[in-house]
Image: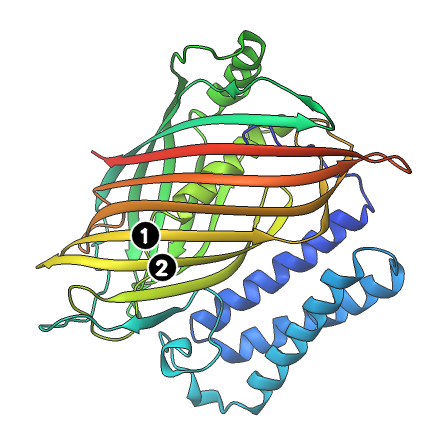
Amino acid sequence: MLLAAGVARAGDPDEDYLKIYGQIENAESLETGGQATQALAMYREAAKALGLFARSHPDWNTKVVNTRLNRLADKINVLSDRPASASPAGTNVAASGGTGAAGAAKVLQAGAEPRKVLRLHPKAGDKQSLETTLKMSMETKMGEMEAPSMKLPVMKMTMDVNVKSVSAQGDITYELVVGDASLGDEPGAMPQVVEVLKASFTKLKGMAGQGTVSDRGVSKGVEMKAPPGTDPQSRQAMDQMKEIFSGAVPPLPEEAVGPGAKWEVRKTLKSQGMSIDQTATYELVTVEGDRLSLKTTVAQRAGSQKIQSPAMPGMKLDLNKMVGNATGELTYDLGQLLPAEATSDMHTESSMSLGGAQKQTINQKMELSVRLQAK
């Protein structure tokens, strides 16, 4: 995963589409944060850009483009009819039975009494260090040729996080710095892969960034600053780190909940060049003051689309399908930004096609284990 995707060529329709998709994600973040007017303006800009894109690239993944255009039209219609005061910051449309903004938590069951409203409340100046450990293995089959299972070395990163400010609305702005990045030993790991990973992964040390998250755990963006001359592999590793960090904070429901409560969060995310629909379910196991323990399950699915080749920059692949599922547990203190401890084990399977008239099918299975530990 850390070696995926090269630099897209200028004027590439894939790159153009991803820029528009980024606009849509920003609009969804604004809507989730209750900024309906700004979200509506950005949805309209994205719809206009996507319409021009469809006319310029009539053969590019028409199913995906048409689906996005329809969803944008629905968003624009809903927000155009909504009074400006109908969506104050923090309103959870999904919880009240509507379609909801992407990333909003929809309560499935409220849990036992006593129930309480869960909100993050770290203070400006709070500092934490988060140690991340990743283990991954892959199996690949190209046509009838099955490659041996490939193990990657254990990857470890330490991120130092400093809460810079907390707004009156509860938005938490933070800075983060990669304190360390190293590879551990893994029996059976291919030496060639280890050397390539080491060359890129260790360059993450010292990289810095900042982000904002609401008091309900909804990320409003994470931006990392890459030093000049950073190679594509290191940038991809940095993007992977952003995904992990963004997912470390659990989204919290609007309503009061108690032990046994369950809520669901649906969103579309970009990963490894793919547009993926994800459904995450959270179960509140225990509540002791500000300390929570949660169980999580995640289901992912990606349909037919064109993606950048993870292994061969400049080569395009046709993704036929991708499915994934994960289970995890985490312990959280609402007075801190990051979890005290979290684990996640994920399995994914994907099918891709490579080539022209005589396409070569590539089937891949991947096991990913992530461990987070606050210090």
Q: Is residue 34 left or right of residue 362?
A: left
Please identify the quarter of the rendering in which residue 235 is found.
top right
- Residue 101 visible: yes
| 338, above or below 256, in the image | above
Residue at the farthest front position: 144
- Residue 230 visible: no
The residue that mark 1 highlights is 296
| 69, above or below 17, in the image | below
- 118 or 367, which lies in front? 367
* Amino acid type, mark 2: Thr
- Which quadrant is the C terminus positioned in? top left
Name the element at disc 2: strand
Coloring scheme used: rainbow
- Which quadrant is the N terminus positioned in? top right
x and y percentages locating residue 275 in the rendered image: 62, 52
Badge 2 vs badge 1, beta-carbon distance below 8 Å: yes
The residue that mark 2 highlights is 281
Residue at the farthest top position: 191
x and y percentages locating residue 17 in the rendered image: 73, 55
x and y percentages locating residue 200 in the rendered image: 54, 21
Q: Residue at x 32, y 72 (%)?
A: 107
Q: CA distance from mark 2 to mark 1?
A: 6 Å
10 Å neighbourhood of mark 1: few (<14), some, or many (≥20)? many
Mark closer to the chain start, 2 or 1: 2
* Amino acid type, mark 1: Thr
Q: Is residue 189 left or right of residue 69?
A: left
10 Å neighbourhood of mark 2: few (<14), some, or many (≥20)? some
